[in-house]
Amino acid sequence: MRCLGRFGCLILVAALAFGGWWTRERWLPARLLPSTQSSATSPGWEPLTNAGAARTRTALAKLSQPTGQVYQTLSGGDVASFVVDELAKHLPPSTDSIQATVVGDQMSMRAIVRPADFGASSALGPLAGMLGDRERIQLGGTFHVIQPGLAEFAIQDVKVGGIGIPRGMIPRLVGQFDTGRRPPGVASDALPLSIPRYIGDIRIANGKITLYRNVE
């Protein structure tokens, strides 16, 4: 009987433990609860690829049809793969290993560059002394269509070698490394981008980039 009693106690303890685990969300502090967000759903950096550029060209070809779909949604890596040749005209010559990601309503691009190529010492002041010979630069922002055939990548935040650059310094930094031709109307904190004239809007939301055809 004592054995049965002990066995019954074990069952009772196990039942109580299971009940506590099952209702843990009601009494356990939120900071101690296990995360339900899988790392697989976290946004990741995408390398630039020929396949990504091809997917963007295909999407643009569909938008060029006056009776076709009026929008196409793509990943940040696909769009960056297509526009990199255009944006590269406005980046330092040492730029390589470009990647892209889209988080929320912002696209970010990062690459390895030589800070000396964009005059880091004059653009960043004392911060330049913390940088090595080659550093990663990260540009985050969104797209604005200025006029038919012309858009801009409006830069909202910059990191150089992990150092966040104050918003007010971004125009000066862009002016240092952008040696390409800047069409009228492009903001001082943005990079110009040639686009097909039939593209009327570019929107970033929910980790994707959507291109809209001008229907006017």
Image (tube, rainbow, N blue to C red):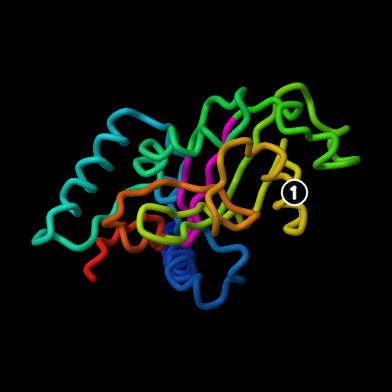
Which residue sits furthest right? 126
Which residue sits furthest bottom? 26
Residue 168 location (% of width, % of height): 76, 58
What is the tally of numbered marks visible in this picture? Answer: 1
Q: In this orientation, which residue lies closer to the viewer: 22 or 117? A: 117
The N terminus is located in which quarter? bottom left
Q: What residue is at 45 percent from the left and 47 percent from the top?
A: 193
Q: In this orientation, which residue lies closer to the viewer: 58 or 99? A: 58
Left or right: 167 in relation to 71: right
Left or right: 194 in relation to 216: right
Residue 61 location (% of width, % of height): 18, 46
Q: Which residue is mark 1?
A: 172
The reply to whether residue 129 is visible in this rendering is yes
Q: Is residue 186 magenta?
A: no
The quadrant holding residue 151 is bottom left
Q: Is residue 109 magenta?
A: yes
The C terminus is located in which quarter? bottom left
Query: Does residue 110 lie above or below 67 as drawn?
Result: above
* Amino acid bearing label 1: Arg
Residue 131 location (% of width, % of height): 80, 31
Left or right: 53 in relation to 100: left
Q: In this orientation, which residue lies closer to the viewer: 196 or 103? A: 196
Which residue sits furthest left? 67
Query: Does residue 156 lie above or below 159 as drawn?
Result: below
The secondary element bearing badge 1 is classed as: helix
Tell me where the magenta segment starts and ends, as one range.
100-111
Residue 25 location (% of width, % of height): 50, 72
Q: What residue is at 45 percent from the left and 51 percent from the top?
A: 102
Q: In this orientation, which residue lies closer to the viewer: 104 or 141? A: 141
